[in-house]
Image: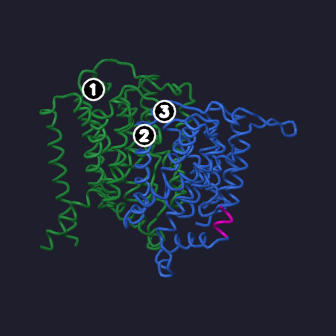
Amino acid sequence: MDKNFATRRRRDLIVAAVLAALAALAPLFVKNVYIQNILVLTLMYAALSQSWNILSGYCGQISLGHALYFGIGAYTTELLFTKFGVLPWFGMLAGGVIAAVIAMGLGYPFFRLRGHYFVIATIVIAEIGLLLFQNWEWAGAAMGITIPVRGDSWLKFQFMRSKLPYFYFALALCCVAWFVTWWLEDSKWGFWWRAVKDNPEAAESLGVVVFNSKMGAAAVSAFLVAVGGAFYAQFLAYIDPESVMGFQFSLLMALPAVLGGIGTLWGPVLGAAILIPMTELTRSYIGGSGRGVDLIVYGALIVAISLALPQGLVSLFSRSKAKGATR
Amino acid sequence: MGLLYGLIAVGLALIFGLMDVTNFAHGEFLMIAMYASFFLFTFFAIDPLLSAPLVAAAMFVFGAVIYLLVVRFAMRAKANAGMVQIFTTFGLAIVMRGLAQLFFTPDYRSIPQSWLGGKTISVAGIFLPEPQLVGALVSIAAFAGLYFFIHRTDFGRALEATREDPGAVALVGIDKNRVFAFGWGLGAALVGLAGAIMAVFFYIYPDVGASFALIAYVTVALGGFGSVFGAFAGGIIVGLVEAVTALMLPPSLKSVGIYAVYLLVVFIRPRGLFGSM
């Protein structure tokens, strides 16, 4: 069993390295800016969903308020950049740290709640954040912030002519989120989280400090999501409260992990790889009429996948593998 | 206003609170009910007040059909039941919004002249808008009816028993799907009633449900899952808190008070005010 686990982990790492290398070569073949754009978004959602999965999938604390951390990352970076001229790289780290601190501050009262009460509390706190930012004049209120163009440079993490730098950053972020998950899976924390998810009382009685392990998961998860938010803000060069902190965003972040397989290493990547291109393509091919057909198709697919594969798309792989083993 | 939130929440309390099924499409049920009474008014000139029972009946069928066609299968999921329910109903909500955009266009609509619209009544020197007043009365009646229904009839007991232990219920000859389909129908009918009354004084557009749905979830959770009376009390508290916040903060921040009160309540009582779960 232990040997299997170790082999599986080594294989996961090799597969990830190969996939990352292939992805890194993709821009050599994909010159179309529109498709490059889809690739950037896919990688970004994979990274976000991977981070969300740490708290909600592994540790089992379903959060539908992660847009809060995403927005904090985006706003910290842009406020520091536009008001104080701080380079986005520092803003990104600052946003991550602030989000992690807030996540732990909120965790203190929140982690006492169970089930629906917890989920609704996460939705509500993100909504409060949204309303506060919409009314915060200094931060641009509901109008948001337009990031001034200062020319292409890695220093300012701003590129107008090409999408490739964004692509590589998103890829890097996705790899980092994946690697952190991979690493945590086999660490003391990873085992604690799964124990907390399955049966908190039993875990507590065996010496797992349930509260601290939830806090750890929340902090890591919030930090990574905030870095994603900072990236998104630089990528779009424009942010407003609704588009970075809206409730829809919390759901969009959770969706790839849920469809791909919640609490699994590959679920978020797989889910994002299928869901995001599909979303973008339906939007541009049948959404142009503005008549909502794209929404119907999109919604129907979500219903179909959640109903057909409650354990997510990854279960397709494990199922075929299980068959192969018995043969 | 609070009682109106209560009326929206009571249907949700039935589905979300008593059957323990997450329904993220509740706001869209409201939206569809509002369109239904709008079209009954424009094409047949039936006043929303008269068409309310009609809309509620139609919504009953709609809710039961949604349960039988979709939600039934979401409840069967053995793994991740909660997430499957959340995202199945979320997907449904998107489909409904898309359909509304397709057939009704994204335009804002309103019912121009109805019996109640824009009229006020003076009670002891205080002017109250009539539609809200009717809404409040209907809401109280709906709560009383539901309370009686859940606690005093065989069906209510069957519903609670089915949530507690579907297996045991099957042994005594109760069909789980029939009970839950009926419950969904009833929940949808109640929100249909709310939609018909709200159509009188709110703009109607495909996304209208989303803004009320979140407050409805908060209302139900504030009162506590599993309690009809809790949802009623939650509705009144939410309405009062909103009115008070509106006096102290700019109108765009009025919901902050509601959310803050929810957080405060669950930190002190993690099961809501009257929750049993």
Disc with the residue nearer the chain's start (1 vs 2): 2
Name the residue tied to disc 2.
Answer: A70
Badge 1 crowding class, 10 Å Cα cut-off, few under 14, some 14 to 19, many 20 or more, is few
Q: Quadrant of the N terminus of chain A?
A: bottom left
Where is B1 relative to B151, above or below? Answer: above
Q: Main secondary structure of the magenta part?
A: helix
Please state which amino acid type lies under the numbered disc 1.
Trp
Please state which amino acid type lies under the numbered disc 3.
Pro
The residue lying at 52 percent from left, 72 percent from top is: B162
User: Can residue A173 be seen in the rendering of this structure?
Assistant: yes
> Which stretch did the figure color magenta?
B146-151
**Secondary-structure class at tag 3:** helix
Question: Which of the chains is green?
Answer: A
Dot 3: chain letter: A
Q: Which of label 2 and label 3 is nearer to you?
A: 3
Between residue B95 and residue B49, name the one nearer to us.
B49
Q: Which mark is residue A241?
A: 3
**Secondary-structure class at tag 2:** helix
**Tag 1 and tag 2 share a subunit:** yes
Disc with the residue nearer the chain's start (2 vs 3): 2
The residue furthest bottom is: B171
Q: Quadrant of the C terminus of chain A?
A: bottom left
Q: Which mark is residue A154?
A: 1
Q: Is residue B149 magenta?
A: yes
Q: Separation of disc 3 and disc 1 at Cα?
A: 26 Å
The residue furthest right is: B124
Question: Which of the chains is blue?
Answer: B
Dot 1: chain letter: A
Disc with the residue nearer the chain's start (3 vs 1): 1
Badge 3 crowding class, 10 Å Cα cut-off, few under 14, some 14 to 19, many 20 or more, is many
Between residue A163 and residue B186, name the one nearer to us.
B186
